[in-house]
Amino acid sequence: MGSLRLAAALLGIHLTFPLTQAIAQLDQLPADCPIKTPVENTVIARAWHEEGINRRNAGILKEILASDVVHHGAELRYSFDQLIVQDDFVVERYSATGTQHGQFGDLPPSGRRATWTGINIFRLKCGKIVEVWSEVDAVSRRQQLQGAASANSPR
């Protein structure tokens, strides 16, 4: 356990291990399901953004996503501010940056650059991401894409 905590500390990850909950989850896994450590789950969750989004490596998604994954959000260029791991969940707090070149919802292309923050929660099972929840500071992003003059416009 000491080397796991050291590796987690080097990665900037907060780990908690409720033993009774972990044992109960083991009983629910299929026999062919590889059990992953919190550090391994973190590597899988980071690959979502680092490889899949930032490096546009679609091939990684076949390796890390379950065939019936449920995703609740959208993506751009990310950097990680904090990772928290507990059981089958990895929570990441991130900063994102992008330039609007195309239509974005009801906003026409502006060429403006925006930076915002958000949180993703990944649920992993059998070494694959099976569900994702995404929350983003959409108000700040919209204000930046519209420009300073429209920051007071109704939302």
Image (spheres, rainbow, N blue to C red):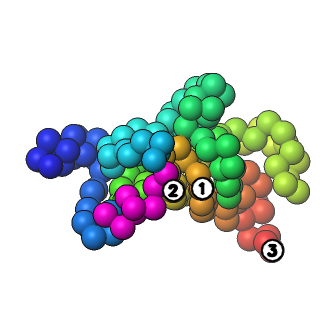
Would you say the residues marked 2 and 1 are in contact, meaning their CB atoms lie under 8 Å apart?
yes
Please tell me how crowded label 1 is: few (under 14), some (14-19), or many (20+) other residues with Cα within 10 Å.
Answer: some
- From which residue to which does the magenta span run? 23-30
Q: Earlier in the sequence, mark 1 or mark 3?
A: 1
Residue bearing the label numbered 2: 123
- 41 drawn magenta: no
Q: Earlier in the sequence, mark 2 or mark 1?
A: 2
Q: Amino acid at mark 3?
A: Pro
Could one spot residue 3 in this view of the protein? Answer: yes
Please tell me how crowded label 3 is: few (under 14), some (14-19), or many (20+) other residues with Cα within 10 Å.
Answer: few
Q: CA distance from mark 3 to mark 2?
A: 36 Å
Residue at x 40%, y 38% (from the top left corner)? 43
How far across and how far down the image is residue 153, in percent? 79, 70
Which residue in the rendered view is the most extreme toward the front? 31
Q: Amino acid at mark 1?
A: Glu
Q: Earlier in the sequence, mark 3 or mark 2?
A: 2
- 29 drawn magenta: yes
- Left or right: 35 in relation to 142: left
Could one spot residue 148 in this view of the protein? Answer: no
Residue at x 74%, y 71% (from the top left corner)? 152
Report the front residue among 98 and 14: 14
Q: CA distance from mark 2 to mark 1?
A: 5 Å
Local secondary structure at mark 1: strand
Quarter containing the C terminus: bottom right
Q: Give the numbered dot on residue 151.
A: none
Residue at x 69%, y 49% (from the top left corner)? 68
Residue bearing the label numbered 1: 131
Report the front residue among 58 and 109: 58
Residue bearing the label numbered 3: 154
How far across and how far down the image is residue 112, in percent? 72, 42
Q: Amino acid at mark 2?
A: Arg
